Amino acid sequence: MLVLGMEGTAHTVSAGIVDEKSILSNSSSTYIPETGGIHPREAAIHHADKIIDVIKNAFENAGVQPENIDLVAFSMGPGLGPCLRVVATAARAFSIKYNIPIIGVNHPLGHIEIGRKLSGARDPVMLYISGGNTQIIAHEVDRYIVLGETMDIGLGNMLDKFARDSDIPFPGGPVIEKMALKGHKLLDLPYSVKGMDTSFSGIYTAAKSYLKKEDINDICYSIQEVSFSMVIEVLERALYYTNKDEILLAGGVARNDRLRSMVSLMAENAGYKAYLTDKKYCMDNGAMIAQAGLLMYNSGIRMGIMDTKINQKYRIDEVYAPWIISGGNEINRNKGAESVIKKSEFFSRNVIIKKRLIKNYRNGELDKKIRYMRMKNEFLILYRLYENGFHVPVVYDFNRYGMELIMENIDGITLNEYLINNNDYNNILSKTGEIISKMHSLKITHGDLTPNNIIIKDNKIYLIDPSMGSLEPELEDIGDDIFLFTESLKTLYRDGKKMQAAFLDSYKNNYSEYNNVMDTVKKISERRRYV
């Protein structure tokens, strides 16, 4: 089966041809503005001028004729409206002229599937970083789900915005990468990880404030070290949550050699297999759209011309993707994403020794700072929760030099394990809602509130690992807790929406600020959408 794919979500218009086995051709043209970032209408004019040429080149390089094509696929979204319309119009015209089927493709899906095709990855967790997107994506049941993403701007967008302020030409990422190689001083930039999500607007603001005060090479070095460490931390946590063992790196920013080396080092140290998409196909390209369209069509998905309206906010978790058999490995109960746990005794008590792991992919100074802050935070929040009658592990010792906590061993099962193996979940989630509402009423947040950080023992619910929480939270922090927990339920379990309802009904009945929190959760959700 021969498939023609057309891509045009942002700065690049491209056409590629694939079959089941290989990429036969790919031809692209990129709009580069004289000043500033991408101007949507000017980019669309560029695409309209170049699309015929890139299609002709794709056919010439593949050695096939338009009459040989069995399917035309195009990027339906997410992306810039004027650019999307150019490519959608061309795809419809081709479909009608040659009387062949047409498929509208989700853009991130194309990045995943071309990466899998080229690398041989079976069922990876993907770190997808481009200008508009920064997402952690994995397959569950019959579709891809977004486990975490940026809560404001994409990492690539942040790099481009900083580049513009520094008179670095578009695209700024490659120039920043070169400058970073000359930098050595780690500047103080906000390390903003909230559960499975990230935020880059603070890094941008702080980095901009250093202009004319610090060496530009040190600023670029610091931007990369901090922002890349953030996304790799979240990636590793996603691998732990899903029990998958493959990583796929994709998107335009995935061409960065520092990022690629950091991902590879994390994988090597943690025992995962890392697949780095060929740099040529990290950038937006028609071949990736063709590959995704081929898989969709072979899985029985069909569209008519009237179904091909563009969608600027098209989410990958809206796409039916049954062609992957997803599954994880056995859980290693003695190791988390950030720590290793060892059972021991402490003055005749059964305890665990929790040691924060050195992350060699991170800058050493940054790594030490993060590990100490989180260990200290975990100790303080557990102590405050214990004082207020919550079921939490009792901390017996705090070893700041060895980065260790010695605490009570709670020998139960995680809420994640419970929800996977039990259909009767209403009662346990109702109790969880009551406990979280009580915690929030005391102005305490958890910071990484997922089913893996809740343990059930003797019908009691224990909260563990609140290392990213706060004792002086803003409403936003409370909203983050609820957003992360409800998103975890929705994405990780087949009955996720019913589970959400059971939890939220209880939370609502026990927390007076419920409406304000849910308004904040709604804003958080809207910020995560593609911009």
Image: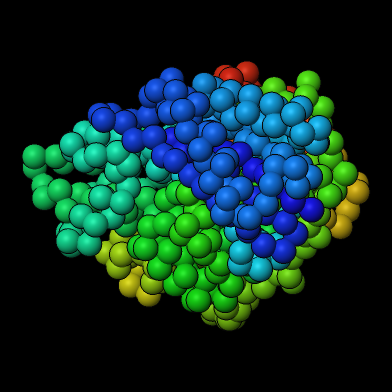
Residue at point 8% right, 39% down?
Answer: 212
Residue at point 74% right, 29% down?
Answer: 97
Residue at point 25% right, 29% down?
Answer: 35
Residue at point 51% right, 38% down?
Answer: 53
Q: In x, y percent, where is residue 260?
A: 43, 64
* Coloration mode: rainbow
Frontmost residue, 31 versus 138: 31
- Against 80, residue 395 (above or below) is below
Q: Residue furthest right?
A: 423
Frontmost residue, 524 versus 28: 28
Q: In x, y percent, where is residue 358?
A: 41, 71
Q: In x, y percent, where is residue 281?
A: 52, 55
Q: In x, y percent, where is residue 100?
A: 80, 36
Q: Quadrant of residue 498?
A: top right
- Against 240, residue 81 (above or below) is above
Q: Quadrant of residue 530?
A: top right
Is 55 positioned to the left or the right of 368 in the image?
A: right
Q: Is residue 146 visible?
A: no
Is 22 positioned to the left or the right of 192 in the image?
A: right
Is 274 positioned to the left or the right of 323 in the image?
A: left
Q: How many marks?
A: 0
Frontmost residue, 376 versus 152: 152
Q: Is residue 169 visible?
A: yes
Is 313 positioned to the left or the right of 358 in the image?
A: right
Frontmost residue, 346 versus 112: 112
